[in-house]
Amino acid sequence: MVAPGKRFLLTVLLLTAVPALAKTGVPFNPLTDIHWEEIEFTIEGVCVCPRPPPIFVEPGLVVSYWEPFLLLDTSSVAFYSAMLGQSVGGGLLDELGGKNKSSDAVDVANESTFAQAHAFLLPLMVGLCARDDYGTWWSEFDPLWQSDELAALLTPEAALFANKAMVLACTADAVAANAGWPLDAMPWCLGSGGLTYPMTGHVDNDNIVQANATAAYRMLYKLNRIGLICDPAPECGCAYTPVWVKSHYKMNLARPSIRGVHPIGRATATWDAGANPPFMGELGPNDEFLWVVYRRQRCCTCCE
């Protein structure tokens, strides 16, 4: 006969392990999950870049294209990775997981979503233009992602945009983003996705797809802010952009279903029909998202 204490412990372990075991999906496949037609190689002209002595300068050709360089998970279950199609944690660690809550349809102010986020570099096209990016990121280990107050330590400028005038100004960015041209002069705006601040997984939107897109945008901005991504658009190298240039990025949903590429801030209502069906999507469980991020590469062939 099992002792009551052991029975209780076994029950707790089983109950806390269920969320991690219940969700599995198809791992990321670069052949089918990347929209390769979006790469769009272009030769723009001649360039000259500085070189060490005794050469000093060297000419070349400017090549530009869209590189699928990053995968972003946004997850409602801590340590579940849609990229891997499985959890790498579980049990009591799931207390860190995401949540969706809505008090009622009228009280919009209390509707919100929380998602953890994971970033993985894609080493698919590293031989073309130089890149100075680093590692991976798991928000479960990042206390700033969990707390709006702590996040302000990384983004002290957020206080400047916490007013109605700045929020209203984002209407212009929403219009531009839906037309395909997000406004780089408004880095605090995410088009139809809301604001980049707070730079956490808390999103004041209970539309699951839109909220997770916003969380993915924020993680992309965060990686720029902390120097893990170097913007490669300058033709003679890359530039660290603690204030991101959002028009240099676009992405597509790859889990739980595959959708087309969209610019930062485009309303998910234009493409999310059936993207997050109940229980299971085409390639993974609902509420667990994988985003393929493309960035604009622009480099001089002399210096790669």
Image (cartoon, rainbow, N blue to C red):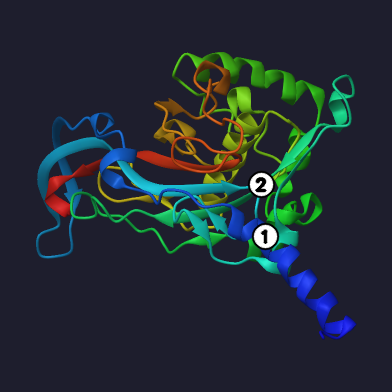
What is the distance, in whole Å, between disc 1 and disc 2 at their CAs? 19 Å
Instruction: Please give the residue where the numbered disc 1 appears in the rendered image.
Output: 18
Q: Quadrant of residue 48?
A: top left
- SS class, disc 1: helix
Q: Quadrant of residue 17?
A: bottom right
Sequence-wise, which precedes: disc 1 or disc 2?
1
At 55% from the left and 26% from the top, the residue drawn is 265
Q: Amino acid at mark 2?
A: Ala
Residue 274 % position (x, y): 53, 24
Q: Is residue 277 left or right of residue 152?
A: left
Camera-side residue: 240 or 84?
Answer: 84
Camera-side residue: 38 or 91?
Answer: 91
Q: Amino acid at mark 1?
A: Val
- What crowding class fits label 1: few (fewer than 14 Cα within 10 Å), some (14-19), or many (20 or more)? few
Camera-side residue: 216 or 57?
Answer: 216
State whether residue 23 is above or below residue 158.
below
Camera-side residue: 283 or 228?
Answer: 283
Instruction: Please give the residue where the numbered disc 2 appears in the rendered image.
Output: 115
Q: Which circle, 1 or 2, is nearer the viewer?
A: 1
At 36% from the left and 39% from the top, the residue drawn is 295
Task: Count the marks.
Answer: 2
Q: Quadrant of residue 159?
A: top right
At 79% from the left and 70% from the top, the residue drawn is 12
Residue 285 % position (x, y): 55, 43
State whether residue 196 is above or below residue 2.
above
Name the quarter where the C terminus is drawn.
Answer: bottom left
Name the quarter where the N terminus is drawn.
Answer: bottom right
Q: Is residue 7 visible?
A: yes
